[in-house]
Image (tube, helix red, strand yellow):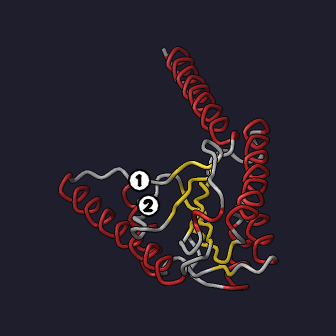
């Protein structure tokens, strides 16, 4: 189980000499710039992530490998792919690449597209329960294979004594190799964003309900 950095006190660097260390940074997906309050929290979050990564590198050693979900290429092409996709991690990743870290090809392209397509299918209203069940089983198998591939990439590229950082969604199911030290980077703005998003979603649901009631009254 990953330990949460920012909520524990790290021992000295000597305890981790010769070990493979992976820093796990949650990718937050939510309302964009059209919700200024939420965007401000996200900006604070990524600023705090950068600060924590710098502090951790001073104690554990420099990041040598970067793993980022949705990237099917490595090196500079991967950085270009990241920039084109509009991920909020661009600044953090670019800084680490400029410091000498290598951006790995984390995903299998065909598996990633298969998972995305199946997820889209499951978002559609399906009339047949057997079809829905088969789609869900296929999606679960595809997702498992996707996460197994990511774990394999980390296992094959992160060497003893090296530090890597992974940017991946909070609900990932990657099972990392036994003996690898995995730390969950959790700056204060992470909880702040979760709380804000929960309240914002409640407000949106209340507004939608009020609009439906007003529309029903107008048709009565």
In the picture, measured across the screen, residue 95 lies left or right of residue 101, that is: right
Q: Are marks 1 and 2 in contact (CB under 8 Å)?
A: yes
Identity of the residue drawn at 74% across and 39% down: 35
- Separation of marks 1 and 2 at Cα, in angstroms: 5 Å
Which residue is more in the foreground, 17 or 56? 17
Which residue is more in the foreground, 80 or 35? 80
Disc number placed over residue 64 in the picture, else none: none
Identity of the residue drawn at 62% across and 35% down: 197
Identity of the residue drawn at 43% across and 53% down: 1
Residue 39 occupies quadrant: top right
Q: Which residue is mark 2?
A: 120
For label 2, the SS is helix
In the picture, measured across the screen, residue 202 lies left or right of residue 38, that is: left
In the picture, measured across the screen, residue 187 lies left or right of residue 21, that is: right
Give the image location of residue 71, x and y in percent.
59, 75
On screen, residue 61 above or below 157 = above
Q: Residue furthest left?
A: 130
Give the image location of residue 219, x and y in percent.
51, 19
Give the image location of residue 24, x and y in percent.
58, 59
Q: Which residue is mark 1?
A: 123
Figure label count: 2
Which residue is more in the foreground, 135 or 78? 78
Residue 130 occupies quadrant: bottom left
Q: Residues within 10 Å of mark 2 (few under 14, many from 20)?
A: few
Give the image location of residue 218, x and y in percent.
55, 17
């Amino acid at each position: 189980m990953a330990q949460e950095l920012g909520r524990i006190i790290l021992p000295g660097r000597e305890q981790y000499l010769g070990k493979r260390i992976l820093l796990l940074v949650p990718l937050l997906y939510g309302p964009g710039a059209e919700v200024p309050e939420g965007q401000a929290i996200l900006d604070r979050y990524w600023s705090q992530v950068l600060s924590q990564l710098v502090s951790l590198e001073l104690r554990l050693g420099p990041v040598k490998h970067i793993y980022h979900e949705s990237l099917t290429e490595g090196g500079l092409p991967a950085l270009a792919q990241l920039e084109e996709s509009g991920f909020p991690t661009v600044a953090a990743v670019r800084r680490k690449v400029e410091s000498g870290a290598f951006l790995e090809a984390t995903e299998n392209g065909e598996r990633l597209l298969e998972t995305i397509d199946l997820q889209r299918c499951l978002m559609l209203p399906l009339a047949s329960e057997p079809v829905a069940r088969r789609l869900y089983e296929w999606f679960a198998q595809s997702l498992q294979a996707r996460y197994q591939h990511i774990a394999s990439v980390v296992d094959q590229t992160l060497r003893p004594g090296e530090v890597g950082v992974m940017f991946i969604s909070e609900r990932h199911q990657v099972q990392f190799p036994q003996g690898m030290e995995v730390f969950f980077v959790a700056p204060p703005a992470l909880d702040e964003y979760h709380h804000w998003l929960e309240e914002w979603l409640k407000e949106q649901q209340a507004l939608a309900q009020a609009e439906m009631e007003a529309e029903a009254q107008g048709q009565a």
